[in-house]
Image (tube, rainbow, N blue to C red):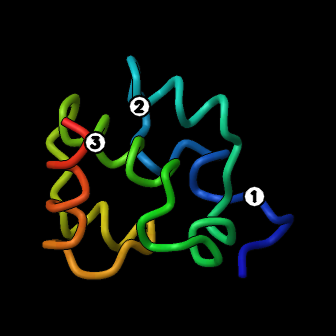
Amino acid sequence: MEKGGQGWIARGEMGAGVGGEAGEIRKNLGKTLEDAKKSAKSAVWKVKIAGALRKQTTATNIWIAERLAMGHPSHVRNLIKEIL
């Protein structure tokens, strides 16, 4: 558990300087690492962030799956395909 309850999204660890759609989703949600761990692997907010990250950055499905606690990277790929 992280000190002070600050998560990776609040601190910008999800991708420093991520702008556009991913940055807006991140800013508006204010989710924490604990939220990602507790939420379903296919939670709508996770899929939206994952899709935006794949479109706008070089983040891999492996990195996204680990950071957002979404399970296997192929699961991330399949969820992203559904929304794109």
Q: Which residue is mark 3?
A: 51
The mark nearer the N terminus, 2 or 3, is: 2
Q: Local crowd at mark 3 within 10 Å, few (<14), some, or many (≥20)?
A: many
Q: Is residue 31 left or right of residue 59?
A: right
Quadrant including the N terminus: bottom right
Question: Which residue is label 1 attached to?
Answer: 6
Q: Secondary structure at mark 1?
A: loop
Please report contact status of discs 2 and 3: CB closer than 8 Å, yes or no.
Answer: no
**Which label's residue is closer to the chain start, 3 or 1?**
1
Q: Which residue appears at 54% of the width and 42% of the height?
A: 12
**Measuring 67% from the left and 66% from the top, which residue is drawn there?**
35
Foreground mark, 2 or 3, reads 3
Q: Amino acid at mark 2?
A: Ala
Residue 13 in the image: x percent, y percent?
A: 49, 50
Looking at this view, is 2 or 82 the one in front? 82
Residue at image position (45%, 49%) is 14
Between marks 2 and 1 in the image, the one whose residue lies nearer the viewer: 2
Q: How many numbered discs?
A: 3
Residue extending farthest front: 82
Kindly identify the amino acid type of the residue bearing the numbered disc 3.
Gly
In this rendered view, identify the residue nearer to me: 29 or 16: 29
The CA distance from mark 2 to mark 1 is: 19 Å
Mark 2 Cα shell of 10 Å, populated few (<14), some (14-19), many (≥20): many
Comparing labels 3 and 1, the label whose residue is closer to the camera: 3
The mark found on residue 22 in the picture is 2
Q: Quadrant of residue 66?
A: bottom left
**Marking on residue 16:** none
Q: Earlier in the sequence, mark 2 or mark 1?
A: 1
Disc 3 versus disc 1: distance between alpha carbons? 23 Å
Q: Position of residue 69 (x, y in %)?
A: 44, 74
